[in-house]
Image: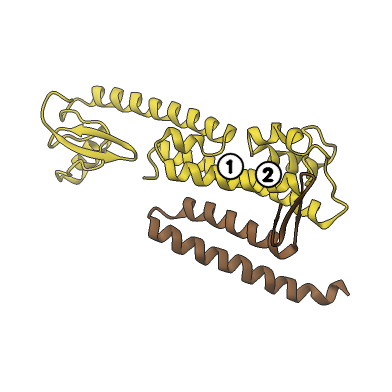
Amino acid sequence: MNEAPGREVTFGEARVDQEPGSQTAHQQDSGNRAGSDTPAEESPVGHAPGDGTIAAGHSFGASAGRCALALFAAIAAWLVPGLGHLLLGRWGRALVFFAAVGGLVLTGYLLRGNVFPPHSGDPFGTLGFLADAGTGVFYYFSRMFETAGPDVSRAAGDYGTRFIAAAGVVNMLAVLDVIEIATGRRS
Amino acid sequence: MNCGALIVVNRALRLSHFGALLLFALLVSLVLACLTQRTSSGGVKYALWSFALFVLIGVGVAWLMYPLSR
């Protein structure tokens, strides 16, 4: 598709060359039904009209690659806050997410908040673990930062528990953002 | 280390209630602005607005709950 000079269109983060007048299988189908010649401004894959099988193959390959990238970026974003955005070239957001999640977690540890273990007996403990585990590597370094252990007998310790849980939830929102960016649903 | 309401003693943080509210509001507002806004100017406006609402609603709820602590 790069042999013929074509327009460069954007789809999410990926910039691809597109031949003038090319359409995806879906756009061809909808265009034929409507009886109009719809310009393919949002097509991620350029190809000549009429080659529906090739188009479907290209589309499936691009979709699979995008899904693999999204999965890899999502795991990276969960493990290290901001790393997913960094892999997608979003330096500013990566910095903000790392600073915000790291700041919340470290403040929670310094306030001696409770870090929930994986195998807790009650449902609230399980929910707390899921929220805490959202912080990725920070969860596994909790013993290193919180050497004195949790102290929820004071209000500060209770605040710390909330800070750590909020950090995990915020990081999971960042993971969802990474998935949307990597799959092209969000620019 | 002593930075106003933020004091670190023996690797334990001593933070006032209002200081904790400010810090939480600041960090969460930054993340929400990044998640919801695509432009820098929109992000700054959203972060400031969200931060102000966090603080105002937090102080308002604390004021409403004050009689319950007596």
**Relative to B67, is A32 on the left or the right?**
left
Question: Residue A68's image quarter?
Answer: top left
Q: What element carries label 1?
A: helix
Marks 2 and 1, the one that precedes in the sequence: 2
**Relative to A15, is A159 on the left or the right?**
right
Q: Please say if A124 is above or below A8.
A: below
Residue A150: percent from left, percent from top = 83, 43
Residue A123: percent from left, percent from top = 79, 42
Residue A13: percent from left, percent from top = 34, 38
Give a yes or no on whether discs 2 and 1 share a subunit: yes
Say which residue label 2 marks. Answer: A106
Question: Residue A53's image quarter?
Answer: top left
Is the N terminus of chain A in the top left, top right, bottom left or bottom right quadrant? top left
Q: Mark 2 lies on which chain?
A: A
Q: Which chain is in brown here?
A: B
- In the image, A117 versus B28, the foreground residue is B28
* Point 53% across, 51% down: residue: B31
